[in-house]
Amino acid sequence: DLLALSGVSSADAFDTVISTFRSRAPWLAVNVITAFCASLVISVFADTIDQIVALAVLMPVVVALGGNAGSQTLAVSVRALAERELSGATTRRAIFREGVAALMNGVVFSVAVSAIAWIWFQDEKLSAVIALAMLATFIWAGLSGIIIPLTLKRLGADPAVASSVFLLTTVDIIGFLSFLGLATAILL
């Protein structure tokens, strides 16, 4: 499951280079498309980034932390699905738990990142923007980390194989959109 979560179907030491390539290339091809979707979101805010260069410096912080938070939830969710621990009331409880945990982590890390941004750039509004964007991204990442694999399973797809592509893309898009959108609305 861990290998599949990364888009790798085999870890056999005797696999050929070609079979290893073939097992990984399709998911990398999907990632090319999804990466350009995230880039498109950034391009919409090119004028904002031109005016406030600090945004380009801080953008990776928002999506990297959000992606890691979502990946943690995703790993727990895929394991729970594989062990058949998610059904009925346990599913609702797990979604609630992950949402609240995402909110709590979002608050803690929003405050920390906001403080670092304020120390670095001495800009209260910028630090407020990154705090709000981090909070939104963490909540999205936490909920997506459980809802995406549940949805894929319901649709008949293997959540261990496909979830990370969708999770990381949506976290990037929401992270960039919230950070750059809030920056445009508040800082300009």
Image (cartoon, helix red, strand yellow):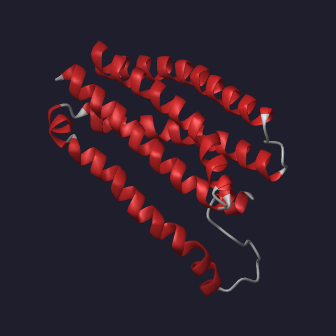
The total number of labels drawn is: 0
Q: Position of residue 56 (x, y in %)?
A: 29, 38
Can you say whether 47 is above or below 107 in the image? below
Can you say whether 101 is above or below 168 in the image? above
Q: Check the image and name the residue furthest to the top.
A: 124
Q: Quadrant of residue 12?
A: bottom right
Q: Position of residue 149 (x, y in %)?
A: 65, 49
Q: Quadrant of residue 121?
A: top left
Q: Who's the residue at 14% across and 39% down the image?
A: 47
Q: Who's the residue at 51% across and 34% down the image?
A: 140
Q: Who's the residue at 79% across and 42% down the image?
A: 86
Q: Position of residue 61 (x, y in %)?
A: 43, 36
Can you say whether 124 is above or below 46 in the image? above
Left or right, residue 68 beside residue 131 = right
Residue 123 visible, this orientation: no
Q: Position of residue 89 (x, y in %)?
A: 79, 32
Can you say whether 153 is above or below 27 in the image? above
Tell me the quadrant of the picture where the C terminus can be found.
top left
Tell me the quadrant of the picture where the N terminus can be found.
bottom right
